[in-house]
Amino acid sequence: MATYDPASRIQKLRHFGEFGGVNPSITDSSTYTFLHGDDMFETFLGHMEGCFLYSRHWNPSNKYLADALAAMEDTESAWVTSSGMAAITCSLLQLCNTGDHIVTSVTTYGGTFAFLKNYLKKFQIEVTFVNISDLESVEAAIQENTKVIYTESVTNPLLQVSDIPRLAAIARRHNIKLMVDNTFTPMIISPARLGADIVVYSMTKFINGKNDCVAGAICGTNQFIHDLSNVNDGTAMLLGPVLDPLRSSSILKNIHTLHLRMKQHSQNAQVLAEKLNRSGISITYPGLKNHPQHELHSQLMNPEFGYGGMLAIDAHTVKKANSLMQKMQEQDVGYLAVSLGYFKTLFSCSGTSTSSEVPEDVQRQMGLSEGLVRFSVGLDNDIEATAETILQICHEEGLA
């Protein structure tokens, strides 16, 4: 597959401000005027390209950001939301009705797991959880009422790599949609180019990169985005998870540096993973040759952006994990905090934090150790020194 350059797609966009500013103007209006009565009616029907009706529907600032996301993903269109969970839930509810069925990876973000396992019951939407790497199990789980296969490009927190092209082939055979959460690997993996129908993000993480806001994105066809935003039955329009235009403007500026940040996150994570791996620490990172899907990741990725900034260390017990994380914070490795994609390294014990919605028995079945510490590796200028500090602490904890 030819190398794809999502960064240049973004850089080539031309968005000027109202008075020729190099940054687009921020439109903080909730409603918009029309010169003719017929124009308002046609806009309600979705027939007026470039006209804005009401900011819950569309606004110029959100449209600029959506255009950049669509360019990055090579999709026809995109929609921005007030959170990553809003992007996930609105997309799934747009695709599914009462009595429908979803096949999903059992290894997934805790909030997504809770929505699929617990919340969708009230709509009588069934969900089957599978090992997404077992493609035979994925296909066997598909029923007559299945509408979507849902997965993450690189799963949270076990860093399992989804075979998107083969999952897409399964979806096409059964005339259903493949939806992929690409939050861990923006620019690194381009799911739509690999066959995914819909790509979702928590832009809170790497895309924004500053942990100063919560936002999400949905990338797909013109038809799907139109359906989402339809004033009569569009899920995103009617549930109202609109992103504030001030935040859209901020994220749009940040997305222009995403390629630089992803390369540095990946480079630092690779150095850290190799050093810890050589010391005998139980570590998971797709960039290591001993990762079960290292070759698959290598085939799917846009090579110049590396293997990502996420890795995991198995401290075996919650007690050891907590001690390890506390010492790392005290010695300035980073912060004991959830989330990811920040310029500082963040770490948390997944089973008792971001995956706590997943029952303990299911955590064990999927291979999630109670002591698994998930790292979002930061933009450290001297990652070797950081690695030495982590290695020393691991020795103190008997992990190396």
Image (cartoon, helix red, strand yellow):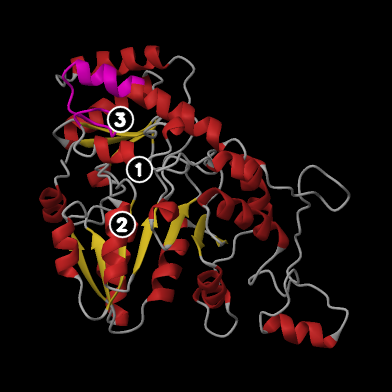
Q: In which quarter of the image is the C terminus?
A: top left
Give how far apart the Cα atoms at labels 2 and 3 are: 20 Å
Residue 8 higher or lower than 26, as above or below: above
The label number, if any, that marks residue 300 in the structure image: 1
Q: Where is residue 113 in the image (x, y as percent from the top left)?
A: 28, 60
In the rendered image, which quarter contains the N terminus? top left
Q: Which residue is drawn at 18% across and 22% down?
A: 281
Please report the bounds of the magenta region as a residue range. 271-290
* The image quarter in which residue 148 lies: bottom left
Q: Which amino acid does label 3 sit on?
A: Gly
Q: Distance between the residues labelled 2 and 1?
A: 15 Å
Which of the numbered marks, if any, corresponds to residue 9?
A: none
Q: Is residue 382 left or right of residue 103?
A: right
Q: Residue at x 27, y 32 (%)?
A: 285
Measuring from the top left, give residue 376's x and y in whole percent. Answer: 38, 34
* Residue closer to the observer: 173 or 114: 173
Question: In the rendered image, which quarter is residue 389 located in?
Answer: top left
* Residue visible at 64% across and 72% down in the picture: 57
Name the kind of residue labelled 1 in the image: Leu
| Residue closer to the observer: 147 or 316 | 147
Check residue 151 in the rendering and tell me which mark sits there, or answer none.
2
Q: Mark 3 points at which residue?
A: 287
Q: In this view, does 11 lie above or below 103?
A: above
Decide if residue 164 is on the left or right side of residue 38. Answer: left
Under tag 1, what secondary structure?
A: helix
Q: Which amino acid does label 2 sit on?
A: Thr
